[in-house]
Image (cartoon, rainbow, N blue to C red):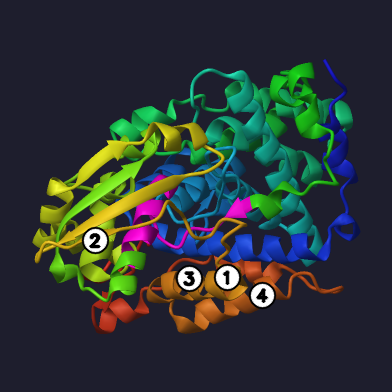
C-alpha cells in the first residue's frame, strides 16, 4: 500500500495552485452541469427522486435545498437528488478513460455544503469543484484498471464527493482516509452494461455515488471506519495519483453537443457532416448503415418508449439527426419519441461492429456512416469521432451556446443569464458564490403556467406542476 496522496491533496489544494486554464475549465463544467440539471428537472426520473428525497431523507429546519427545487432534505438526500437530476438528461461532461462522469456527483455535493453558509468564497467553490474532479477521475481510471466488470460512475465519483465533504468539514487526514475508504466500499458497484442493454432510470449510478460519498465523510467524522481505499492507495494504481497537482485531469473532460450517450455521438456527427457536405436533406435518405465499436452497437433500442431508452440508443438519435438536422432534448423525449419518420429509419438501420474500432475503445470512440439516398447514391463518411473532446473542442462559445439553448426553455432567459454571469465571475478576488448557489437551488418558477402553457426543453407543451 502507498501513502494516500489523495488525502494530502484534499486539504492542501489552494486556489492559487490552479492554473488559469483549469479555473476557466471549471467554470465551463459548472454551467454545463447546471444546463443538464435544468433539462433533467422536466423528466419523470428527476421528479420521482426529488419527491423521494424530500419525503424520506428528512432534513427539517436544518436541511438544505435540492438543486432547482427549493424543498429541503439532508446533505446526502440533496446529493442523491441532484446527481440523479443531472444524470436524468445525458448531456453533462465526461472523461474518456473513466467511461463516465465526475461532475454529476460533485456539483450537488458542493451545493449542499454551501447552502448553510452566509458567505461563500467563489474561489473556494471552484477549488472544491476541481478537487472533486481530480479525485473522482483518478478513482475511475483506477477502478477500470483493477476491476473486471464495467462499473457505473457512482462506483468511483463517490470518492470525489467524499473528498469535497472532508475538505469542507476540515476532517483530519486520518478521518479523510476513512471517508475515502467508506466511499469506495459503499459506492454502487453497479454494472453499466446492464443499463445499456435494459435502459431504465437507474442509469449511471451517479446519484447514489454522490449520496454514498457525502454519507461516507459524515460517518467518518463520527468514528465509522472504512480505510483503505484500494483505488487510491494500492501499489498497482500509485502512478495514477503521483501527478496530483501537476497533471490536471479536469482538462481532459469532453462536452457533449447532443443529450444522448457519448457512444452514439460519433455517428450523429458523421451523419450531419454528410448531409452538409453533399447538400442533401433528411427526406432524401432511404437507409443508414453504421459501423462502430462493440459497446456502441449495444445501444440497440430502435423504437424507444421512454427518454431513458432514447438516450441509451444509437439508431434512434442518429435517425433523429437525419430527419431533423439536430438532436436536442425535444428529439429524445415526449412527442419526439413517436415521430414516424425517425422510427422508420431507426428500425431499418444497419449496425455493424468493426473490430478495429473496438480495439481503439475507450481511448477513442469512432464510427463510420453510409447514407443511401432514395435515388441510389451512397454517401460514406471518414472514420469520425465525436465533437467536444479536448482534441475537437466545442470551445467556450460552443459550451455557453449549449448552456443557453438548454437552460432558457426551463428557467427563462433572465435567470439563465444571471446564473451564467455569477458562474463566470466566481474566480474574482472578492467574489462570493452565494448568489450562484441561491440561483442554482431555487425552484423552477411556475408563474408562466398560470397564464399560458409553454414549450419545455423536451418539446412538450404543458403547465409546470407545483412541485417542480
Residue nearest the observer in this picture, 250 or 361: 361
Q: Pointer 3: what residue?
A: 402
Q: Residues within 10 Å of mark 3 (few under 14, many from 20)?
A: many
Residue at 39 percent across and 37 percent down: it is: 293
Q: Up-down: is 101 above or below 40?
A: above
User: Is label 4 in contact with label 2 (beta carbons under 8 Å)?
Assistant: no
Instruction: Report the residue at 82% width, 41% height from top.
Output: 244
Local secondary structure at mark 3: helix
Q: Quadrant of residue 448?
A: bottom left
Residue tagged 2: 320
Asked whether the viewer can see residue 361, the reply is no
Q: Is residue 339 above or below residue 133?
A: below
Above or below, comparing residue 420 to residue 170 in the picture: below
Query: Total label count?
Result: 4
- Residue at image x 46%, y 26%? 190
Q: Are marks 4 and 1 in contact (CB under 8 Å)?
A: yes
Disc nearer the start of the sequence (3/1): 3
The residue positioned farthest toward the top in the image shown: 1
Q: Which residue is mark 4?
A: 422
Q: Which residues are magenta?
A: 253-272
Amino acid at each position: 500500500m502507498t501513502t494516500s496522496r489523495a488525502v494530502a491533496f484534499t486539504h492542501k489544494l489552494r486556489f492559487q495552485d490552479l492554473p488559469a486554464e483549469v479555473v476557466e475549465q471549471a467554470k465551463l463544467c459548472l454551467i454545463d452541469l447546471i444546463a443538464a440539471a435544468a433539462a433533467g428537472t422536466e423528466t419523470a426520473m428527476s421528479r420521482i427522486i426529488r419527491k423521494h428525497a424530500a419525503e424520506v431523507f428528512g432534513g427539517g429546519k436544518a436541511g438544505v435545498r435540492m438543486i432547482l427545487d427549493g424543498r429541503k432534505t439532508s446533505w446526502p438526500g440533496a446529493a442523491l437528488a441532484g446527481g440523479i437530476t443531472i444524470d436524468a438528461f445525458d448531456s453533462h461532461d465526461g472523461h474518456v478513460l473513466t467511461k463516465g462522469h465526475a461532475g454529476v456527483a460533485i456539483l450537488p455535493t458542493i451545493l449542499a455544503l454551501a447552502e448553510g453558509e452566509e458567505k461563500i468564497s467563489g474561489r473556494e467553490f471552484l477549488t472544491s469543484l476541481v478537487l472533486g474532479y481530480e479525485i473522482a477521475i483518478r478513482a475511475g481510471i483506477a477502478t477500470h484498471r483493477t476491476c473486471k466488470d464495467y462499473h457505473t460512475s457512482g462506483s468511483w465519483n463517490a470518492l470525489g464527493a467524499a473528498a469535497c465533504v472532508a475538505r469542507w468539514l476540515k476532517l483530519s487526514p486520518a478521518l479523510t482516509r476513512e471517508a475515502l475508504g467508506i466511499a469506495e466500499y459503499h459506492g454502487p458497484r453497479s454494472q453499466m452494461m446492464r443499463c445499456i442493454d435494459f435502459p431504465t432510470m437507474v442509469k449511471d449510478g451517479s446519484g447514489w455515488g454522490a449520496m454514498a460519498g457525502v454519507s461516507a465523510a459524515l460517518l467518518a467524522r463520527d468514528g465509522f471506519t472504512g480505510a483503505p481505499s484500494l483505488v487510491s492507495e494500492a501499489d498497482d494504481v500509485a502512478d495514477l495519483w503521483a501527478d496530483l497537482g501537476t497533471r490536471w485531469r479536469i482538462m481532459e473532460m469532453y462536452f457533449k453537443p447532443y443529450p444522448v450517450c457519448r457512444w452514439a455521438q460519433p455517428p450523429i456527427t458523421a451523419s450531419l457532416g454528410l448531409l452538409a457536405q453533399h447538400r442533401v436533406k433528411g427526406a432524401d435518405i432511404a437507409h443508414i448503415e453504421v459501423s462502430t465499436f462493440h459497446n456502441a452497437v449495444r445501444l440497440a433500442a430502435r423504437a424507444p418508449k421512454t427518454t431513458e431508452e432514447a438516450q441509451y440508443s444509437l439508431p434512434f438519435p442518429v435517425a433523429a439527426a437525419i430527419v431533423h438536422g439536430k438532436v436536442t432534448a425535444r428529439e429524445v423525449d415526449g412527442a419526439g419519441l413517436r415521430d414516424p419518420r425517425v422510427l422508420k429509419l431507426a428500425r431499418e438501420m444497419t449496425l455493424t461492429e468493426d473490430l478495429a474500432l473496438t480495439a481503439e475503445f475507450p481511448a477513442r470512440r469512432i464510427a463510420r456512416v453510409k447514407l443511401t439516398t432514395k435515388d441510389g447514391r451512397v454517401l460514406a463518411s471518414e472514420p469520425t469521432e465525436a465533437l467536444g473532446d479536448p482534441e475537437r473542442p466545442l470551445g467556450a462559445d460552443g459550451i455557453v451556446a449549449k448552456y443557453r439553448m438548454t437552460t432558457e426553455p426551463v428557467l427563462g432567459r433572465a435567470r439563465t443569464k444571471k446564473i451564467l454571469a455569477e458562474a463566470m465571475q466566481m474566480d474574482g478576488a472578492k467574489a462570493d458564490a452565494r448568489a450562484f448557489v441561491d440561483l442554482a437551488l431555487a425552484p423552477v418558477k411556475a408563474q408562466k403556467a398560470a397564464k399560458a402553457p409553454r414549450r419545455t426543453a423536451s418539446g412538450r407543451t404543458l403547465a409546470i406542476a407545483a412541485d417542480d
